[in-house]
Amino acid sequence: MRLDCALRVPRRDFTLAFRETLDWLGIVAVMGVSGSGKSTLLRALAGLEPAARGRIVLDGQTLAEGRRRCPPHRRGIGYVFQDARLFGHRSVHGNLRFALDRARPGTEAPGEAEVIEALALGPLLARAPAGLSGGERQRVAIGRALLANPRLLLLDEPLAALDAARKRELLPYIRALPARFGIPLLYVSHAVEEVAQLAGEVLILHAGTVTARGPVYEVLERPEAEAVSGAFEGGVVLDVRVRRQRPEYALTEVELAGQHLSLPRVAAAPGEVLRVRVRARDVAVALGPVEGSSIRNQLRAQVLQLTAEPHGPHAELLLDLGGPHLRARITRESADRLALYPGQTVWALLKSVSFDPR
Amino acid sequence: MLLLLLGTPLAWWLAGTRSPFKPLIEAVTALPLVLPPTVLGFYLLVLFAPDAPLGGLWVELTGQTLTFSFSGLVLASMLYSLPFVVQPLQASFEAIGRGPLEAAAVLGARPLDVFFSVASPLALRGYLTATVLGFAHTLGEFGVVLMVGGNIPGRTRVVSIAVYEHVETLQFAAAHRLAAGLLLFSFLVLVVVYALNRRYPVHAG
């Protein structure tokens, strides 16, 4: 999927200026705080923004050029809204049929049975949208969007209205979509956890402008990402390989750049790759390996960079694990006491590692 | 029926438009609510006169005058009852919001398709209210009809005026028959409509 954009959408408090070319197969995420223009971008791509100006070319087909725009129903772009927007006068099955009856013709269109199975919609079919839970509603909305056989599926914070448990439940469904149905996803969110779990490439949007772009590992380490997530949630995303299970402690041992880590048990076979996230505030540093501590995950690293807040209490360390990076958030006082400097070898102590099975 | 056909597109347009003329059109639509029926009737009479442009055109097209004829009566009634149809419809279209309509469009539904398969079913209550109000108001009106239609037996005599005439000429028995008939008929129609309304509750959104 190749998307070529040069868009301008004036809004009351900012102007979205999006000039990017995206080339992808899986999931690209757009991150930003509320009011940064994320939804405006998706709406403009789908043709729902009358004020949008500029060019949109999708796989060689021009969807918009200046003031001339292809109407939404002929774009072949699916859209999952934050609030699901199911049709209240139709049952769940009626909602799915609505999309199916209007589906873009194509031999590889997702089949009804396949979509119902993939999103576990079977038990919901006869129900009315008003009686569904938030998570069920979003599953139906995703299924409905798929059945219209879109070339590209836009998801606008589909998990924002759900509680943590429902989010975890729905994430694997979303992650599996591109491979299963051959439809690339553009996923908008302000939640680092979701983006870290789903995306290959990430764009960060701030006040209508792209401030950072790149692979998820790189971008989520950057300060621009922290502006979205808040310093409290800042951290890194790492791919680790499962070494072995340790059922006696309910732990899973994984490998990261030649060093070992233990995670709370993950159902994964040795050799499998997991994506984990380590928040900067969960990493402490020591000048040598620490004995007599409850922290078992200690990694040898080199200080790459030390950034102290000029007036605040904290300092941020960028650590090199011999390829992958870690970030540590420590106090400025500790940084001075330990006399940390770039190039120094330290031990990173990981208090917690969060992850979901890939 | 004619009123619904005319009122629906107008209400749909009014609900969706961002045109600067919207308040103007809304005001014109609502005028019959404010004006005394005789004022409206008077202007319509002038407009429908065979030597006025509209009346003249009608005469040329159909060979009949609009004034003191059944077709003129229908036209006048429609204008007079228009706000009673347009306003509930517009309100219910606006209550649906753009959400479901956008959702339908990105699923590949053409605008007309969106209207018939999403907006109209969701606005069912609005249609019912519009039907009841439009019907009731048309049945009960008096002034405009008298001005434009006159009271020609068999052509432009309507029930409400017939009742008035019977009372004026002290034919109370005849007035009773007509009035009771009208009362019963109106009541039955309303009962049917409200019963339907209860049977098919519609939740927007």
Image (cartoon, coloured by chain):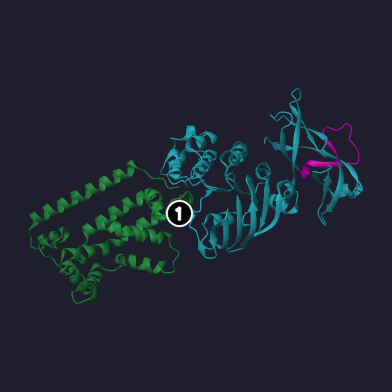
Q: Is residue A284 magenta?
A: yes
Specify the farthest residue to the top: A248
Residue B78 as seen in the image, left or right of residue A106: left
Q: Is residue B37 above or below residue B205?
A: below
Could you tell me if residue A80 is visible in this image? no
What is the quadrant of residue B157 in the picture? bottom left
Q: Chain of mark 1?
A: B
Specify the farthest residue to the bottom: B51
Rendered shade, chain A: cyan
> Looking at the image, which is closer to me, B109 or B127?
B109
Q: Is residue A116 above or below residue B60?
A: above
**In the rendered image, what is the letter of the chain coloured green?**
B
> Residue A345: image x %, image y %?
90, 43
- The amino acid sitting under disc 1 is Gly
Location of the C terminus of chain A by quadrant is top right
Residue B125 as seen in the image, left or right of residue B58: right
Which residue is depicted at the point 78% across and 44% down? Answer: A281
What is the quadrant of residue B35 in the picture? bottom left
What is the quadrant of residue B163 in the picture? bottom left
> Residue A25: image x %, image y %?
62, 46
> Looking at the image, which is closer to me, A333 or A143?
A143
Residue A282 as seen in the image, left or right of residue B22: right
Question: What is the secondary structure assignment of the residue under circle 1?
Answer: loop
Which residue is depicted at the point 31% across and 50% down? Answer: B128
Total tally of numbered discs in the picture: 1
Residues drawn in magenta:
A279-300
The residue pinned by badge 1 equals: B97
Q: Is residue A93 magenta?
A: no
> Residue A317: image x %, image y %?
83, 48
> Looking at the image, which is closer to me, B182 or A82?
A82
Could you tell me if residue A215 is visible in this image? yes
